[in-house]
Amino acid sequence: MNIKDVNFKEVSWWVLLATAVLVVPCIAYLITTLAHVTGGSEVLIFVISCWACVFFGLRLMKAPRINSIMFENIIITEPTKLRFISMIAMVESEITKWKKRYDKSEAIFMSLSKQPAWSYIDEVVVILTCIKHSVTKDASISFTDIKALTEWVESAKSSVIEQYLHSLEASYGYAKAEYAQQGKSIDETYPELSNGNSINSFIKAPLFATTYAREMMKTLEKEYPLIGRFSAVKPISKAA
């Protein structure tokens, strides 16, 4: 078997199995020896010791910090889960509405390119959506999704989006002045620009998406300190 075909989760499972097979009887034998009993009592203590080792071992494996190391994910708390689901759903909804308003008012922004800023917006929404699906399903987030979020947050992509939005704001200001010069109202001509007829309101949705991505990363790092260490490690993945 090629080493490239083995991933971290599979190795961890086999290591865990081998450890359990070796450690459980060894600890049980040690306890039995220290008890200084013989006969049926020795067998009984050995069995009880094995059972206790397995029981407490399983309890330990359910601890979020241990579970994170062994199974490449973190188990989040119920309040965090509900907040993530709610906020990500809001990001998805607001970005969809924002794109529709943009399309109806695109002429104001003249030839200002949507790319690459739009692709970066779509990228962070996809990452957040994957996280939402995961926490909704089993209240967990994989290290793969955490790593993707970390890389996005730490890259210059959010800055590109912010500068793009500043460019939209400048284009809007130019167009508004030109419309006023012609005796027209840009807000009346393009009522879909925003609910409050304000460019600040219009650019709020993409800014919220980038801001929440950073906020989510900080929340995860604060509640689960191991994330900062393990999300930076590239796991061994299967060859394409």
Image (tube, grey):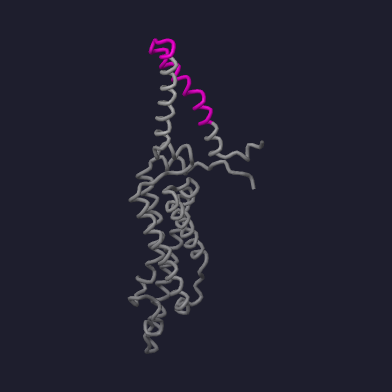
Of residues 196 and 172, the one drawn nearer to the viewer in this rendering: 196
Q: Main secondary structure of the magenta part?
A: helix
234 shown above or below 203: above
125 shown above or below 23: below
219 shown above or below 103: above
**Magenta span includes 16:** yes
Of residues 53 and 42, the one drawn nearer to the viewer in this rendering: 42
- In the picture as drawn, the residue positioned furthest to the right comes out as 1
From the viewer's perspective, tell me whether residue 224 is left or right of residue 142.
Answer: left
**Magenta span includes 30:** yes
Question: Quadrant of the image for the N terminus?
Answer: top right
Q: Position of residue 227 (x, y in %)?
A: 42, 43
Q: Position of residue 180 (x, y in %)?
A: 37, 85
Quadrant of the image occupied by residue 159 = bottom left
- Disc count in the image? 0
From the viewer's perspective, tell me whether residue 3 is left or right of residue 48.
Answer: right
Quadrant of the image occupied by residue 62 = top left
Report the residue at 37% width, 59% height from top.
87
Q: Position of residue 157 (x, y in %)?
A: 47, 58
Quadrant of the image occupied by residue 165 = bottom left
197 shown above or below 40: below
Report the residue at 48% width, 42% height from top.
72
- In the picture as drawn, the residue positioned furthest to the bottom comes out as 183
For the magenta stretch, what is the residue range?
A: 15-41
